Image: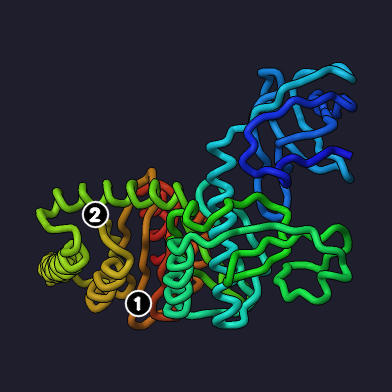
């Protein structure tokens, strides 16, 4: 059985050990078991530590029964003495993230009775899945209390009670525990069964910030940034905000109102442009008459194609308006005031790789073909 030094001292960065076994895996790499290790294996939603053995990179660490298995590209001799060094910057960031998640979930459980049913400390962020939907306002309150606890620098401890002792302790757990129980206690806040690594005091976490909330099944999925990752996330967003501030010539806290004003102006301009296009089209076709007209217009939105075709259908028996290019395909509308155009559209889609449908008097869709083939087919079919 591997002696797990990360449970004795989670701040231990390196250790000397002896190789107990070294087996070649199917992928050509080697699974190495030591008599003791500082390397935390992947588990409980937490990534494995990374680092080196005698300067050789450890690619992955996992549990194999009571042993911890270190995956390397190169083998070691059984009985060989090795020196392991972990990437402590990565370890400490994970400790910050894992500890912050405990506090938040403990607070949410205390306030709203929700249970943590899923958890992952990712490279980009921490995600937590709760078994019930809680509102953004409730999450904001839990976030505020979490940060207050962090700044109070409370003690975090771990213990290994027996199953008999654990029966008298109230603690959170995502699943039923059959083996050794390890409890992580945050003073005056939370007790949770957990196999991961944590900081000794909440103040070392720094801060926690919720970045997104979504529904997942019957519960809530919450994404958060914690510790150094929260600072890096804030810095990146601050830099982007500064760029926007300069581009818009607005103070950072005025950007939202400024963008809304720009959106309103753009919407008005789009409305005016669409009206201009329709008026120009109406003028162009005012003297048209006959049984058939196929029109190609540039850079139209689907709604504009429909409206122009509607105008054209007042002038001719069969009207077709299209917009697009041979490379990107065409948006189309086919209409008639007196005839059912659905079968024509069905044949059109089938012949020229199109998709769409509609009512007897009007069909809409998209077609992927070149302009000449489209025009020839429509003129032939409609006539």
Residue 217 in the figure: left or right of residue 350: right
Residue 363 in the figure: left or right of residue 14: left
Residue 290 in the figure: left or right of residue 276: right
Residue drawn at x 13%, y 67% is 265
Residue drawn at x 55%, y 43% is 92
Q: How has the structure been colored for display?
A: rainbow
Expressed as whole percent of the image width and height from the top left, the position of residue 184 reads 68, 61
The residues tagged by marks 2 and 1 sit, at their Cα atoms, a distance apart of 22 Å
Query: Label for residue 218?
Result: none
Q: Nearer the viewer, residue 43 or 169?
A: 169
Q: Which residue is mark 1?
A: 336
Give the quadrant of the C terminus.
bottom left
Q: Nearer the viewer, mark 2 or mark 1?
A: 2
Expressed as whole percent of the image width and height from the top left, the position of residue 362 reads 39, 76
Regarding residue 211, the answer to whether it shows in the image is no
Q: Secondary structure at mark 1?
A: loop
Residue drawn at x 83%, y 75% is 167
Where residue 63 sits, quadrant-wise, is top right
Expressed as whole percent of the image width and height from the top left, the position of residue 253 reads 19, 63
Mark 2 and mark 1 lie on one chain; the one further toward the N terminus is 2
Q: Which residue is mark 2?
A: 298
Regarding residue 296, the answer to whether it shows in the image is yes
Residue 214 in the figure: left or right of residue 191: left
Expressed as whole percent of the image width and height from the top left, the position of residue 235 reads 33, 47
Q: Nearer the viewer, residue 27 or 106?
A: 106
Label 1: few (<14), some (14–19) or many (≥20) C-alpha neighbours in 10 Å: many
Give the quadrant of the N terminus.
top right
């Amino acid at each position: 059985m591997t002696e797990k030094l990360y449970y004795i001292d989670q701040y231990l960065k390196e250790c000397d050990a002896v190789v107990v076994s070294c087996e070649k895996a199917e992928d050509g790499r080697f699974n190495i078991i030591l008599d003791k290790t500082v390397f935390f294996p992947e588990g409980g939603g937490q990534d494995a530590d990374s680092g080196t053995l005698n300067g050789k990179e450890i690619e992955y660490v996992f549990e194999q029964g009571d042993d911890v298995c270190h995956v390397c590209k190169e083998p070691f001799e059984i009985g060989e003495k090795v020196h392991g060094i972990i990437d402590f910057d990565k370890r400490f960031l994970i400790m910050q993230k894992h500890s912050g998640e405990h506090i938040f979930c403990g607070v949410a459980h205390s306030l709203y009775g929700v249970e943590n049913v899923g958890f992952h400390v990712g490279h980009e962020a921490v995600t937590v899945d709760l078994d019930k939907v809680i509102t953004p306002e409730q999450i904001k309150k839990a976030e505020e209390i979490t940060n207050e606890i962090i700044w109070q620098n409370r003690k975090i401890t771990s213990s290994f009670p027996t199953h008999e002792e654990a029966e008298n302790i109230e603690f959170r757990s995502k699943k039923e525990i059959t083996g050794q129980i390890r409890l992580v206690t945050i003073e005056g806040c939370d007790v949770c069964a957990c196999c991961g690594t944590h900081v000794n005091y909440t103040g070392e976490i720094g801060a926690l910030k919720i970045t997104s909330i979504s529904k997942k099944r019957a519960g809530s999925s919450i994404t958060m940034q914690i510790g150094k990752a929260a600072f890096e996330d804030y810095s990146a967003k601050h830099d982007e905000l500064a760029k926007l501030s300069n581009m818009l010539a607005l103070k950072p806290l005025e950007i939202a109102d400024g963008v809304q004003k720009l959106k309103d102006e753009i919407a008005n301009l789009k409305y005016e442009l669409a009206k201009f296009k329709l008026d120009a089209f109406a003028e162009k076709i005012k003297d048209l008459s006959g049984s058939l007209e196929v029109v190609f217009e540039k850079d139209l939105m689907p709604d504009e194609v429909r409206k122009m075709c509607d105008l054209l259908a007042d002038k001719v028996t069969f009207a077709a308006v299209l917009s697009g290019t041979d490379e990107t395909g065409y948006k189309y509308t086919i209409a008639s005031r007196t005839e059912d155009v659905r079968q024509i559209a069905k044949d059109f889609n089938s012949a020229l790789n199109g998709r769409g449908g509609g009512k007897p008097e009007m069909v809409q869709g998209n077609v992927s073909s070149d302009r000449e083939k489209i025009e020839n087919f429509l003129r032939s079919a409609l006539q």
